[in-house]
Amino acid sequence: IAAEKGVTVEYKHFNGQNDTTILGQIGAQVVADGYDVIIPIATVAAQYAVTAAEGKNIPIVYAAVSDPVGAGLTGMSNVTGVSDALNTPFIMDMMFAADPDIQTVGLLYSLSEPNSQMPIKEAKAYLDAKGIQYLEKTGNTSGEIITAASDLVGRCDAVFTPTDNVVMTAEAAVAEILNQAKIPHYTGADSFVYAGAFATCGVN
């Protein structure tokens, strides 16, 4: 579209690897280099971009932020974007359609991942309404997530993880643990399934 309108767009791609130190450095560099717009992808990247650009009035257009309000990304004139909010009840429905006899659901997520807060709250409400038990296991590093997944073995019939970037970094190992135990892992994005999780239904 830009070419059709005679506009030349130059862009540079940065990968923060969901590392807060790297994201902070990238934010500072992008602001110092004088880019006209910042397009962060995912919640933590968007938060660091907003912090780096504070007071500079640089337009920030985020993508793939599950809960913009909860992440503090609303109410600013230079910040807008697109949410990939998860339909948690739909995934829960899918889980029980596949196995109506589930007695206990494992909730595997990171306490430091903003994307997980609302879907986990929704999952708990759904399971409480059905009288289904759940077991929460969390971690803030790949190693902690792998340990948490191991702790779920033998204690639940299925596991749910939302669009949690911390869990995603460990998903190959998590999937191996859960698959060996024959525990299906329901997740919030297809990237998890490509890494070995059982099923998802997320945003297209």
Image: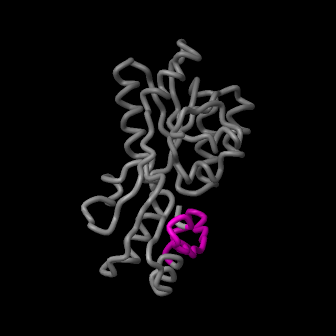
Left or right of residue 38, residue 174 in this image:
right
Instruction: Reply above or below: 125 against 169.
Output: above
Residue 201: x, y in percent?
Answer: 55, 32
The stretch drawn in magenta includes residue 7: yes
Residue sitting at x 32%, y 77%: 57
Residue sitting at x 46%, y 26%: 90
Quadrant of res 62: bottom left
The stretch drawn in magenta includes residue 105: no
Instruction: Reply above or below: 110 against 188.
Output: below
Segment colored magenta: 3-24
| Quarter that holds the C terminus | top right
Left or right of residue 15, residue 87 in this image:
left
Q: How many marks?
A: 0
In the depicted view, which residue is nearer to us: 55 or 132? Answer: 55
Instruction: Reply above or below: 75 against 110.
Output: below
Residue 83: x, y in percent?
Answer: 41, 49
Residue sitting at x 37%, y 34%: 122
Residue ranking furthest to the left: 75
Quadrant of res 59: bottom left
Residue ranking furthest to the bottom: 32
Residue 177: x, y in percent?
Answer: 71, 38
In the depicted view, which residue is nearer to us: 144 or 85? Answer: 85
Left or right of residue 54, residue 28 in this image:
right
Residue ranking furthest to the top: 101
Residue sitting at x 70%, y 26%: 182
